[in-house]
Image (cartoon, rainbow, N blue to C red):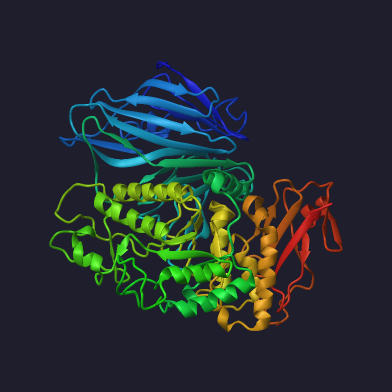
Amino acid sequence: MTAEAGQRWTLRGTHTEYTVRVPAHGRWLELVAWGPHGVSDGPSPVGYDGPVPFLTAGDAAPIEYATDADRPFTGPDLVIETSNGQRRVGFAHTDARIDADQRELAVEFADPVTGLRATVHYRMPVGTDVVQRWVELTNDGSDALRVIRAGSGGFCVPTPHGALLSHQWGQWAQEFQLSHVELGHGTFSIGSSQGVPGHLHVPWLAVRDTAEPAGPAWGMALAWTGSWEISAERDTGGLTRVRVGRQLVDGPLELAPGERLTLPVATGAYSSDGLDGLARVWHTHQRLLAGERLRPRPVLYNSWEATYFAVEAQSQLALARIAAELGVETFVVDDGWFVGRDDDTAGLGDWTPDPAKFPAGFDTFIADVRALGLNFGLWVEPECVNPKSSLYAEHPEWVYSVDGRPITPVRNQYLLDLGRPEVAEFVHSTVDGLLRRYDIDYLKWDFNRPRTEPGRSGGLGPLDLDGAHVANLHRIYERLRRDHPGVLIEACAGGGARTDLAMAARADVFWPSDNTGPLDRLAIQYGFLHANAPHLLSSWVTDAPGLFDPRPRTLAFRFVLAMAGVLGIGADIRAWTPAERAEAAGWIARYKEIRDVVTHGEVHLIGGPDQARCAVQYTAPDESRVVVLAWHTGRLDGAGLLPSRPVRLPLRGLDPAARYSHGDRHYSGSHLTAAGLPVRWSATHDADLIVLTRD
């Protein structure tokens, strides 16, 4: 299709549409409307053609991908610098292509001065209400260019009464804390410069109008496993523009003549049903990313909190025998299984099973575990190395470093420069070799330190170290999944520091936090499920107290909590009493009956950890069953603070005329929606799993 003034295109999702156009001047692409089907049939809710004193027209326009010439004052997505230091790239529309199904669009622009060409891509995957956006930059000029800012796009949201922003903040052991900020004017920003998405913030943001918090919600997320930034700015005219993209922690990116740079995918989501509805849009998208690998995950046991580094065959087998009796399906040996690994000061990089810990051989040990009817899993951290290791002695140049400067240790370890081809090959061959050599069904891939050194041995530069590391990490995951399709991969980074849409497309499950304390974990999982589907949520039952909220909870509370995603156990089950083991076996059996609904069902988040009502509802795709997991968030000391009436949990999405049964109790869909499902708490009954069957 050739360029034409005033062109307009609409992409259609399951319930939503996304309409963009090139104005008559042809300098940029702008949003017309984003929302339910038909929203673009009328004046644009984000358009503006009024006066802009002391600004330019582009500063107020709903531009989809803005250069510094388009938005010189209110912030561009792309900043390019020539070899002589000049900026202000200005585009002209040249071409556009849209597929017959109106699901994929590519709009091309070119700068006649520098020769830079930008192709803005859109995709609305079948069965979703998300729009994926990315940009390809090609240097068709004769001189090298420097990319100073590398945003993936700008999302424009109408917020006439003020913007209500929802984001997730945290720290190690306190990830995914959901928070809300009212933005009347000005800018709000979050990001990470750590080379991973990080514990401090999640590359996810939601925007609502302050007058309608339960109404329309727009979400943005970035599919990038490195450093990133998201900012939201609300102007005086009531438009909130969200910029999403990479944070260039290594400095400008070099774009030589003829080179092409593809920027990360930024994904937008829309729901008319507030944050709860927006969560379901994200869940649907991530389930489609999982593809054929979306299936109920096995119940696992991980030995870390039981033995820490004191791994040896007999103690692990003792744990495995009990785990098998409880109904566990996969046994995972965590850190401490390889040579030199008696604590965190040595061993990383030398990925050979320790013969002293497995005197009969690692093969024999695995066979013994499997003879119990268990699958076998293993922990690795292949991107890191201890200074006390054979690998570091042989290849000190393989770690990130700045010549002449000391290397910063974190957790007594350094970070391998995965962007080096030889390092990427070592990491891949190490993990691939373990999977080929041993009978492994589950891999826990950890990452316990961010990158601190902005350099490579030998002083080469400038380099896109962040981009090279992420690209090779993704390639390794893809190769492992291709060559070992039966192996499940869990992504971990000291907890939840590596959760983004790019990893959701490559890993099978996320470890959201190292904090397994019950009430702490409830808040973590509540935030997590706003941005991630349950099949990605790995959760363990342990004996650990909370770090931030140490109030005790029952074993039942811990099991019901862990059932909200992928059930695991991490406690020292050798110390559990016969009664506790029997209770655990009962919960595991019940989980196996409902995990297909947890994996595939429609999720509704009811209340929250700071409210009297706190539950998650999963409705089976055929609506035959409704699974409700509920927790008591108040005091359990019997001091007269327990409610005199049952807590009512208002369920959602049910047929009002349908009948639902739980044991000898029967409810109409109307009653469950309007009056709510009753639950009564006590000091000994602080959580419940309720399965409603449609009559």
| Quadrant in the picture for the N terminus | top left
**Left or right: 177 in relation to 189:** right
Q: Is residue 373 above or below residue 137?
A: below
Residue 380 percent location from the top left of the image = 39, 64
Residue 140 percent location from the top left of the image = 25, 26
What is the total number of numbered labels drawn onto the structure image? 0
> Which quadrant of the structure image shows residue 354?
bottom left
Q: Nearer the viewer, residue 654 or 156?
A: 654
> Which quadrant of the structure image shows residue 344?
bottom left
Query: Can the viewer see residue 494 in this picture?
Result: no
**Left or right: 368 in relation to 247:** right
**Left or right: 27 in relation to 519:** left
Q: Nearer the viewer, residue 681 or 599?
A: 599
Residue 165 percent location from the top left of the image = 51, 50
Q: Is residue 67 above or below residue 349?
A: above
Residue 550 percent location from the top left of the image = 55, 77
**Left or right: 345 in relation to 602:** left
Query: Can the viewer see residue 413 in this picture?
Result: yes
> Which quadrant of the structure image shows residue 13?
top right
Which residue lies at the image location 39% right of the left edge and 42% below the top edge?
264
Q: Nearer the viewer, residue 531 or 56?
A: 531
Q: Is residue 539 above or below residue 150?
A: below
